[in-house]
Amino acid sequence: MTVSPPNVPTISILIPALRPDWLDTAIASALAQTWQDFELLIGDDSSDDRIGSVVRKWDDALIRYVRNPLPRQPGTNRYLLIELACGEYLKFLFDDDLLLPRSIELLLQACRETGAPLAFHARHLIDTKGCVLGSPMLVAAGERVVLEPSAVFERMVSGCVNLIGEPTNILVHRQTLRAIDAPFSLDGHRMRFLTDMALYANFASRSHSLVAVGYLGAGFRQHAAQASVGDAPGRSAGYFEWDLLRRWAVDNGHLDRHAYERDRRTMRAMYRQIMGRYPEVKAFVDLLDSGPDETSRWPALDADFQEALAMAYAQIEIRKLRRAETLAATPATP
């Protein structure tokens, strides 16, 4: 990896901001890092001045504030910040999350000492008031484990489980990230929900190791506005995009066909959890029941699956429009 030239920060902390509710806490947690050689970039994706009014309260030379010229267009705020970043490494921080003080210090140390271009730590699950709901950890406190590329596919993609967590948990080498075209997508398939898993799969598919750090270094806030909560219109994508990942992985040789077949029952069980609320997933269950298998045709990511994918995304957009119309017609609470 290259060494940053003089006057260029080691780290760029990126906050793609949309909601002002917890932005002050996110900014404060960034500025409180024990590693102080960083810039803090805040991209405003809102349609009003609420984000700007929060940022203006902070008189700190480390902060750079920009408005996204394409507000609310999927992924544009995040990619804008990546393009503007100067640091050797990028640290993502969402506007409703927070970092603990040694997050950057320990992740940077892990990257430099192992040579891995991406490091991650654990996080606390917190509620709207910051109370801890749980603190799952992949490795023991104080330990460090290198995750080989094959493990991303064999343990995570095959089993439909994100052991790394959200991008707030990670530190990533900027040039390695920028060398991947559309790193939060899969070969032209724009992910709506599992953008984090697409990133990890893209790194692993290029033979990049990832390193896990045994430290609870972030707070992932759970609240009603998240896409994964309750009956959110796009929640079904959090299921069928695992199917997309698995099919892409087996077609590209990152996942063994026998492992793919073995874990199809996991995928079916996941779909059946939500089939009553999200009827579009029945098409994916039907496809799982009909192949591919050892005696039927490949690739797994075939035209039938891609048609079901397009229809499912269309259903999600319809639900979003209907929900927006319902909210617009609902009288405001006095």
Image (cartoon, rainbow, N blue to C red):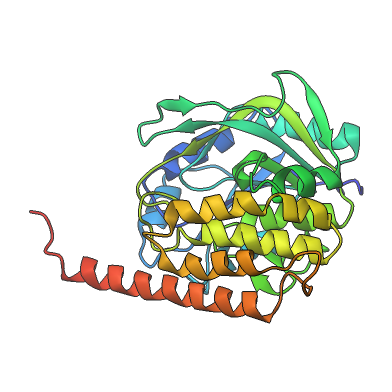
Residue 10: in sight, yes or no? no
Give how far across and how far down residue 331 sits, in percent. Answer: 11, 64
Depth order, front residue of 293/45: 293
- Residue 314 vertical position relative to residue 62 in the rendered view, above or below: below
**Figure check: 311 above or below 103:** below
Q: Residue furthest left?
A: 334
Res 320 visible: yes
Q: Residue at x 50, y 35 (%)?
A: 28
Q: What x and y, as percent, mark residue 210?
A: 81, 41
What is the residue that sits farthest to the front in this orientation? 295
Figure quadrant of residue 108: top right
Q: Locate residue 90 relative to residue 207 in the image: left or right.
A: left
**Does residue 286 lie above or below 30 as drawn?**
below
Total marks shown come to 0
User: Which quarter of the figure has residue 304?
Assistant: bottom right
The picture places residue 276, in percent across and down from the top left corner, at 37, 59
Name the quadrant containing residue 121. Answer: top right
**Residue 297 position in % (x across, y down):** 78, 75
Tell me which residue sits at (36%, 46%) in the image: 21
- Image side of residue 10 versus residue 112, left or right: left
Q: Is residue 134 left or right of residue 256?
A: left
Residue displayed at 36% across by 37% down: 128
Residue in the foreground of this view, choosing between 64 and 95: 95
Instruction: Report the residue at 77% width, 69% height from top.
Output: 181
